[in-house]
Amino acid sequence: MKSRIGIGFALITALFLSFMLFKRETAAPQSRWKAGSSLEDITIVQQDGNDAKWELRAGRADLGRGMNGADLENIRLEMRGAAPLSITSRAGRYDFAGRSMDFAGDVVIMGGGWSLSTERAGWDSLSGTITSEEPITMEGRTFSVKGSGLSVDVKTQRAKTSAVTCRFNLL
């Protein structure tokens, strides 16, 4: 009788330990990043299949308390595709849910043969637009445009602005 109790106890113990080991291995991993965390030298990539649609790099990211966005420093956003664009700025905020970004401080947008500078701009990855309400300066090899307000279609690189002053450099 004692040997049956001993075997039963050993069997129950073995089943319990097996369950605990199995449960530990298959449990969902806990996130290393907690609300309020800071990260250095980060990269966020939005992919479309095997191709990167855009890549966001920042020297520092402070995650918000609600984990709904990140305050970034020393930003570079590279948009891939038929008409690649890049945006740099000193600071900004990335909204995880809305997949949008606000840039602030020495914002420079560069496209095919032109660059645009302003102090603040916003980018919406879902609609594919870059906007600003601030004064802008856009320059290319043969032109210079100053204006206020901005709307850029990322796919076509067509820009709209108002209160424009243009200068053309004829060859």
Image (cartoon, rainbow, N blue to C red):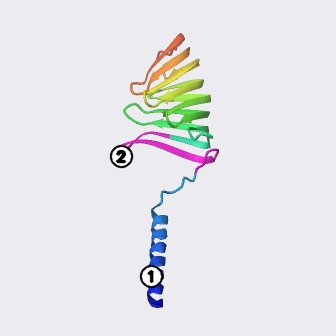
On the question of residue 146 being in view, the answer is no
Q: Mark 1 points at which residue?
A: 8
Lower sequence index among marks 1 and 2: 1
User: In the rendered structure, which amino acid carries the disc numbered 2?
Assistant: Asn
Residue drawn at x 46%, y 22% as measured from the top left: 152
Residue 100 position within the rendered picture, expressed as x and y whole percent measured from the top left: 51, 31
Disc 1 on helix, strand or loop?
A: helix
Residue 5 position within the rendered picture, expressed as x and y whole percent measured from the top left: 47, 85
On the question of residue 8 being in view, the answer is yes
For this orientation, the residue located farthest to the front is 1
| Left or right for 128, reference 144 | left
User: In the rendered structure, which amino acid carries the disc numbered 1?
Assistant: Gly
Q: Give the crowd class for mark 1: few <14, some 14-19, many >=20 residues within 10 Å.
A: few
Q: Is 41 situated above or below 10?
A: above
Q: Does the magenta stretch include residue 83?
A: no
Please give the range of residues in magenta: 33-55
Q: Is 41 situated above or below 13?
A: above
Residue 107, by quadrant, is: top right
Q: Nearer the viewer, residue 94 or 64?
A: 64
Q: Quadrant of the N terminus?
A: bottom left
Q: Nearer the viewer, residue 73 or 125?
A: 125
| Left or right for 51, reference 148 | left
| Circles 1 and 2: CB atoms closer than 8 Å | no
Residue 82 position within the rendered picture, expressed as x and y whole percent measured from the top left: 36, 32
Disc 2 on helix, strand or loop?
A: loop
Q: Mark 2 points at which residue?
A: 50
Residue 100 image label:
none
Q: Does the magenta stretch include residue 51?
A: yes
Q: Which of 53 and 124 is in front in this view?
A: 124
